[in-house]
Amino acid sequence: MPRILVVDDDPMVGATIEVLLQRQGFDVTLADGGEMGLAALEAQTFDVMLIDIFMPHMRGFESIRIFHERAPAIPLIAMSGYAFASSASPSPDFLRMALELGAARCLRKPFTPDALLTTIRECLGGSGEAALPKDKKEAP
């Protein structure tokens, strides 16, 4: 059973991701901030990390950089609902910056359950079919 670390300071986002992943057969550890996430990372091993980019007590990309440095072999999925760059806006593209800091994939909030599961499966290797228990695969 793949182990997923979810670090997000928004309790509703964290709980929603946790329930979705548990229903798909994943073992989920939920941390409500960077410090709790780092403590979980030191206490257990994980197959994938989902880390919110912007959380209190960790300034912006500090969380992505620290989690990647602590566990460089674990795929890190950066999540953010912050405003993103577009052709009409000169604001920075935070998800692209997260990739440069070591994130394997990025998700823009709000994302769909399918987008989350697809991204996790990609990080687990290929289609991800082998990553799910046989009785927990999604219906076609």
Image: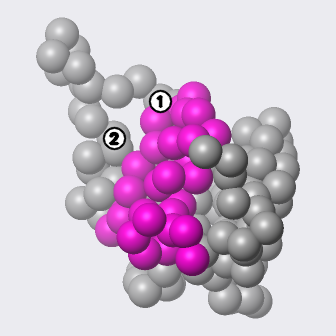
Q: Residues within 10 Å of mark 2 (few under 14, many from 20)?
A: many
Q: Is residue 46 visible?
A: yes
Q: Quadrant of the C terminus?
A: top right
Q: Is residue 8 left or right of residue 91?
A: right
For the magenta stretch, what is the residue range? 102-130
| Quarter where residue 6 is shown | bottom right
Indicate whether residue 125 is drawn in magenta.
Answer: yes
Residue 134: x percent and y percent?
72, 72
The residue closer to the viewer here, 45 or 25, is 25
Residue extending furthest front?
140
Look at label 2 and name its amino acid.
Phe
Instruction: Look at 27% across and 50% down and name the residue there.
Output: 97
Q: Which residue is mark 2?
A: 94
Nearer-N-terminus badge (2/1): 1
Q: Which residue is mark 1?
A: 82
Residue 137: x percent and y percent?
69, 60
